[in-house]
Each structure stands twice: as C-alpha cells, then as structure tokens.
Amino acid sequence: MDTLKAIQERRSTRGFLDRPVDRETLERLLSLAAQAPSAINIQPWEFTVVSGEERKRLSRLLVKRMRERNISCGPGAKRPLQEYFTDRQKGLLDCMLPNLPEGVSFQDFINEGSCNFYEAPTAVIITIDHVFSNARLTDIGIVVGYLVLAAHAMGLGTCPIGLITAFDDEIKEMLSIPDEKKVVIGIAVGHRDPDSKINRPRSERAQLSELVRWRD
Ligand SMILES: Cc1cc2nc3c(=O)[nH]c(=O)nc-3n(C[C@H](O)[C@H](O)[C@H](O)COP(=O)(O)O)c2cc1C
C-alpha cells in the first residue's frame, strides 16, 4: 500500500474480530515498526507481545485496578486546557457517541475498552529503560506511528492505549518485565471488524492554519 494512502486512511480500531493474529504476521509488523528512526540509532523501544489467554488475564487485572482506583482516560494536562484543545476532544466525543453500544457511556466505553484492548487478540506493550530521559519518548512516539501505519498497510487494525500507563507496576509484575523498564504505551492489534459500528466514525483533524506558524 502507498504510504500516503495509509496515512490518509488509518483510524483507530475499537471493534476487533475474534480471530488471532499469527506469530509470523506479528513478527513482520514489529520488524517494520522497528525501521523507525531514533536518536543516534539507539532504538530505545522494547516490545512485549501479549496474546490469547494471557492478554485476557492482563485485561481482567487492568479492569479490576481501573475500577478500584477510579482511573479514567484524560489528556494528562497540568492546567485546564485552552478552548481549541477541548473543542478537538469534543469532536471525538461527538463522532463516537452515536456509534457506542446502547446504554454504555462514553467514559465507560473508553475506560473499560482500553483496559480490555477492545478485545483485540494481541496487545503490544511498549517499554523504555529508566536510563533514558523523557527526550527519548519522541523515539517511542515515532515507533508507534510506524507500527500503526504498517499494521494498516498489512490489513490490520490498531488502537494506541495510553490509559494503561497508570498500571505500570501491575503490568510489569504480571508480564515479568524488569523493574527498570517503564510502560510507555500499549497498542491493541487485531483484525478490524467491518460490521462494528464503533469503527465507523472518523475523527476530524484541525485545519493547518490552527497548527502552523509560518516565518519567512
Ligand atoms: C499516545 C496515545 C494514547 C492513546 N490512548 C488511548 C486510550 O487509552 N484509549 C483509547 O481508546 N484511545 C487512545 N488513543 C487513540 C486516540 O483517541 C486516537 O488516536 C485519536 O482520537 C485520533 O483518532 P484516530 O486514531 O482514529 O485517528 C491514544 C492515542 C495516542 C496517540
């Protein structure tokens, strides 16, 4: 698939088919993602691939902890957001609301769905070693971008799941990830359900004029 087409087409998947992604496909996906550039080619990303029953076991723990601690998806802002940011957030809410399962609130759908990796057969947990400063999170962001685009080009759906960073200790313990690693993000990976209503909305993007300052 053409790269520009993949960039235009890709949107997050929150409705997956109950069909596993085979090991060979996952290896190809991660090899493609790992082609991402990184500062001085340090490649600070590490992947833990969690599939099948183990993914379900992890999700049960995350849902339990999320409910106990009342954790919710949010922008992670230090102060109240400016209106143009909240407008974009509202845009996502508006396009998702009519497509939610009946009787389920947006917050519950996102919070429970995220902890369940939206029932995707595989979750890729991306960690970074504590030795690195926050500057290296840029590299992780790029590898995530490569991963979601490569998955789309391979006919797979993905959803980045930032919520799970609230459960760093629990995830590391369950998956035997060493203590000196930090969970940066998870990615739900699977086959997109073409009949799932929740996959229909396409979130909009801001106009370039809102995002760019030109200086000539
Ligand atoms: C760093 C990051 C964290 C995210 N965390 C979550 C999450 O915890 N739960 C979720 O449902 N979506 C999550 N998303 C998906 C975003 O909501 C989604 O990318 C955004 O609304 C734009 O929609 P699109 O991916 O369909 O283009 C996350 C995306 C990114 C990049």
Image (tube, grey):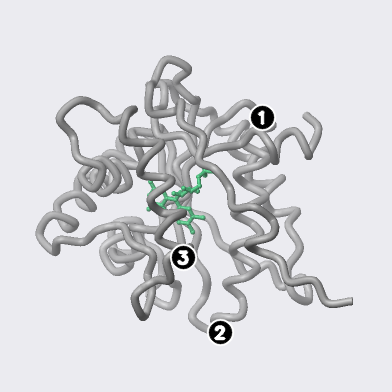
Task: Find numbered disc 2 in the image and state the secondary structure of the residue it sits on.
Answer: loop
- Residue pictured at 80% horizontal, 71% vertical: 214
- Residue pictured at 77% horizontal, 29% vertical: 1
Which residue is labeled 2 in the image?
133
* Label 3 – label 1 distance at C-alpha: 24 Å
Q: Dot 1: within a 10 Å radius of its alpha carbon, few (fewer than 14), some, or many (20 or more) residues? A: some
Q: Amino acid at mark 2?
A: Ser
Q: Residue furthest top?
A: 195
Describe residue 64's horizontal placement relative to residue 113 as left or right: left
* Label 2 – label 3 distance at C-alpha: 13 Å
Label at residue 184: 3
Q: Dot 2: within a 10 Å radius of its alpha carbon, few (fewer than 14), some, or many (20 or more) residues? A: few
Describe residue 50's horizontal placement relative to residue 129 as left or right: left
Q: Amino acid at mark 3?
A: Val
Mark 2 CB within 8 Å of ligand 1: no
* Percent coordinates x, y for residue 104 in the rendering: 18, 34
Front in this rendered view, residue 111 or 33: 111
* Label 2 – label 1 distance at C-alpha: 33 Å
Nearer the N terminus, badge 2 or badge 3?
A: 2
Which residue is labeled 1 in the image?
154
Quarter location, residue 22: top right
Q: Dot 3: within a 10 Å radius of its alpha carbon, few (fewer than 14), some, or many (20 or more) residues? A: many
- Residue pictured at 38% horizontal, 22% vertical: 197
Dots 2, 1 in contact, CB < 8 A: no
Q: Amino acid at mark 1?
A: Met
